[in-house]
Amino acid sequence: MMSKQKILNKRDLNEKLKAEIDVTNPKNQQTTGRRRQSPALGKPKNTAKTIKRLLQYMGGYKFALLFIALFLATATGMALLVPILFSRAIDNHILVFDFTGVYRIALIILGLALFNSIVRFFSRFIMVRISQNVVKSIRKDAFDSLMKAPVSYYDQKGTGDIVSRLSNDIELISNSLGQTILETINTVIVLFGALILMFYLNWALALVVMVFIPLMVLFVVKISKKTRKGFKAQQIHLAALNGIIEENVSGLKTVKLYNQEAPFLEEFSEENNRLKKAGFMAQFYSGLVWPFIHFMNNFVFLTIIAVGAMLYLRFDALVSIGQIAGVSQYSRQFMMPLANMAQLFNALMQGVAGAERVFELIDADNEYALDGTQEIESFKGEIAFDDVTFGYDAALPVLKNITFKAKQGDIIAIVGPTGGGKTTTIKLLNRFYDVQKGRILIDDVNITDYKIDALRKRIGIVLQDTQLFKGTVYDNIHYGDFNATEHDVIEAAKMANAYDFIMKLPQGFQTMIYEGGQNFSQGERQLISIARTMLNNPDLLILDEATSNVDTRTEKKIQTSMKRLMSNRTSIVIAHRLQTIKEADTILVINNGELIEQGSHDGLLAQKGFYHSLYRAQFEQ
């Protein structure tokens, strides 16, 4: 059993995460926990470029946005007139008991409030529609790019990071577009409008307000920095915790098999505790802003009243009661945007950071950029590897100078130790990767000259690790050829010896397959996958340990079906069990990326080389 200490030794926290954890523990606490790369949000690398690109997505709605901006600016500007009207009502009507004028101003204020509410309602409605349409376009472009990205992109990024970009990061864009644009327009207008109108009403009282601005700005900026770091740390820990949950749920059977519930529970508890601390500090600092703003609001309001009263009593020509009331209201309107600006900036930066990660996905390499031009209806099936060298890292070749040929209808078997490069050959044949040296030919044509989609359509693959999709059994087999009839699907199932077990299912071919096919055994999943390939009726067939997960009796039935399927088709079989490839026309022995032997089964045994030693290891114990 794996010890708890060994599990802890596997844990290495991303350097960025360590920096952010300092927010929750100034003493630079030691952290543990298995880490997959967390899709943490940092500061955008190129804010201007990302914002410009977002604006391009919004370009189709520029007239609607201009309409919103103008009407919102008008409504906000008119709302700013309320304190002036209130001031005039006091000085010109209430103090002289002119209630007709008071009623008139009250109706004007009521009308302004109603107009402001209507404009805000429609502005919010239109902005939500625009933001959702923009996000829909971004999500579509991201998913389209994902479908066109080469396999290497998936190898580099990982599933968790890609899913995070398509979900969490796009959600940040949605929140940023839907909230910050309207609030920013409103906040800027209120901030400068209130400041100007305060001085218009009474410059002396406006100066009283200005005295407190440096203190408030300093406080808000300091707190905002801590809040931003806290929320970033919270997002990082949340992503890490989600990764732990995903890993343990998907591998629950293995966890239980090795009785490792306790260490995993401890790991979850530790990460959960770090998330709690980060969340507490983020919320704590965030919560300090509004109490401070409210206190300063009341304090400034009280100061204006006190100073205004002293000026009124001593210099009544300098200030009036109405001006005191008007400036005090403007001071309240002026204080709130100071806090809003910091929070809006944080929200905007989060949205931009999310957009930057999504745009990185959209800008991923397109494997069709190097697509060939030659269409193909079918292959004869002649394959040639001509001095092929390839490595996932160019400096570390996996295959070295591989050369072999397969005639039409040949069965080519590839054997060798694990990690020797066997599976890499079929990845190259399907152009999941392109060779770095040499060339691969099908029917005497370099595969780079064929259209990628046409190439892959004529190659059928049955892998050791099957992939079933959510849907019915029928749907998963039909996936091999959407033009096939129901009769064709049933016949493919029969050829794969899957028909009998399918008919025993509660709904037969209409039985639902859950995510990943977890409600089926590994062998059943393999049989469905083989039926899908048979329905595809490919010209070239690749079997990568296709029968390794079925019992011996079923394997014999499948081998019989496979012989029918491989008849008159060039087939490449990757196998560890040498008993299954005795009848292959040519057996290739690959070790450490080099083709060290090739020939028939009997011929290779007669050579008494590497293949002979592999065979003896399996059958002559």
Image: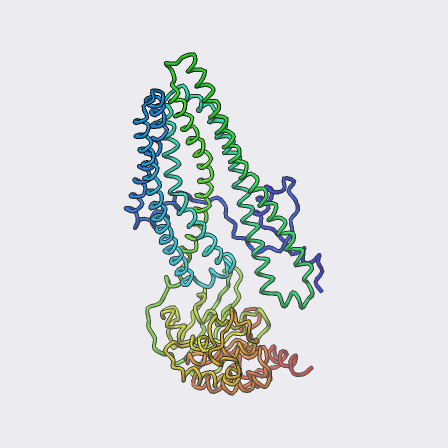
**Position of residue 365 measured from the top left corner of the image (x, y, whole percent):** 41, 58
Identify which residue, 110 or 348, lies in the foreground: 110
Q: Is residue 597 above or below residue 283?
A: below
For this orientation, the residue located farthest to the top is: 314
Q: Does any portion of residue 53 appear in the rendered image?
A: no
Q: How is the image coloured?
A: rainbow
Q: Residue at 57% of width from left, 47% of height from top?
A: 17
Q: Quadrant of the C terminus?
A: bottom right
Q: Position of residue 117 (x, y in %)?
A: 35, 41
Figure check: 356 above or below 253: above
User: Which residue is located at x 37 percent, y 30 percent?
Assistant: 192
Of 512 and 578, nearer the camera is 512
**Residue 568 image offset from top left, x and y in percent:** 43, 85
Q: Quadrant of the N terminus?
A: bottom right
| Residue 488 in sight from this viewpoint | yes
Residue at figure coordinates x 66%, y 46% from the top left: 30
In the depicted view, which residue is nearer to us: 224 or 446?
Answer: 224
Q: Nearer the viewer, residue 74 or 554?
A: 74
Label tally: 0
Q: Position of residue 63 (x, y in %)?
A: 28, 46
Q: Quadrant of residue 551?
A: bottom right
Q: Is residue 147 left or right of residue 601?
A: left
> Is 225 placed above or below 135 here?
above
